[in-house]
């Protein structure tokens, strides 16, 4: 089992608020035993919305079956970033499961530039980072992104 999954977010700058928000993800395994990463994804949706509902609201447009629990995300893989009209997004992070399949005694990080133009102003959005490993339950963390109603960071 992976020791730790971390998700943080940072503004680029006031002048870039309309474009992107940096979301830094980190996976750490302090053990010498390698742990396999089968899939990693960011799930973005309104903070007040349960993550299962966030995925299920996107599932129809993706021609994917709905999920009953979060472990089912691994069976509904998407290979490219998908964003709906309400700002919900699925962002697969191939950096973890293609480039860094096995993690042992290390900490690897990836920063994703989340486009915020589809997010509704004044609505907090949860950016959830899910990591799935071989024969393991998922690990997840969360950060919140809020675009102020006046557009100022």
Image (cartoon, rainbow, N blue to C red):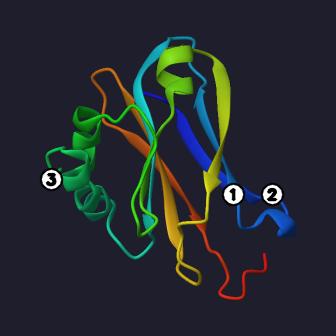
Q: Residue at position x 61%, y 67% from top?
A: 145
* Up/down of 96 relative to 113, above or below: above
Q: Are marks 1 and 2 in contact (CB under 8 Å)?
A: yes
Q: Dot 3 surroundings within 10 Å: few (below 14), some, or many (20 or more)?
A: few
- Counting from the top left corner in percent of width and height, residue 75 is at 22, 33
Q: Dot 2 surroundings within 10 Å: few (below 14), some, or many (20 or more)?
A: some
Between the C-alphas of marks 3 and 2, the distance is 36 Å
Q: Secondary structure at mark 1?
A: strand
Give whichever of 101, 79 is nearer the camera: 79
Mark 3 or mark 1: which is in front?
1
Query: Which residue is the site of mark 1?
Result: 21
Q: Which label sits on residue 99?
A: none
Task: Pick whichever of labels 1 and 2 is earlier in the sequence.
Answer: 2
Q: Residue at position x 74%, y 58% from top?
A: 10
Query: Which residue is the site of mark 3?
Result: 68
Between the C-alphas of marks 3 and 1, the distance is 30 Å
The reply to whether residue 103 is in sight is no
Q: Residue at position x 80%, y 62% from top?
A: 16
Between the C-alphas of marks 1 and 2, the distance is 6 Å
* Up/down of 153 relative to 16, above or below: below
Task: Pick whichever of labels 3 and 2 is earlier in the sequence.
Answer: 2
Q: Are marks 3 and 2 in contact (CB under 8 Å)?
A: no
Task: Pick whichever of labels 3 and 1 is earlier in the sequence.
Answer: 1
Give whichever of 144, 60 is nearer the camera: 60
**Horizontal arrangement in the rendering, residue 64 relative to residue 46 (left or right):** left
User: What number of labels is visible?
Assistant: 3
Q: Which label sits on residue 12?
A: 2
* Up/down of 82 relative to 97, above or below: below
């Amino acid at each position: 089992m992976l020791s730790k999954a971390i998700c943080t977010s940072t503004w680029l700058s006031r002048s870039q608020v309309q474009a992107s928000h940096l979301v830094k993800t980190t996976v750490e395994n302090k053990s010498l035993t390698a742990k396999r990463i089968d899939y990693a994804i960011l799930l973005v949706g309104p903070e007040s919305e349960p993550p299962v509902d966030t995925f299920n609201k996107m599932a129809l447009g993706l021609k994917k079956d709905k999920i009953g629990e979060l472990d089912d995300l691994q069976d509904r893989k998407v290979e490219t970033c998908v964003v709906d009209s309400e700002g919900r997004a699925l962002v697969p992070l191939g950096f973890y499961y293609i480039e860094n399949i096995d993690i042992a005694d290390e900490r690897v990080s990836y920063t994703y530039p989340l486009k915020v133009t589809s997010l509704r102003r004044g609505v907090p959005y949860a950016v959830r980072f899910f990591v799935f490993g071989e024969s393991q339950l998922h690990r997840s963390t969360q950060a919140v992104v809020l675009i102020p109603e006046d557009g100022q960071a």
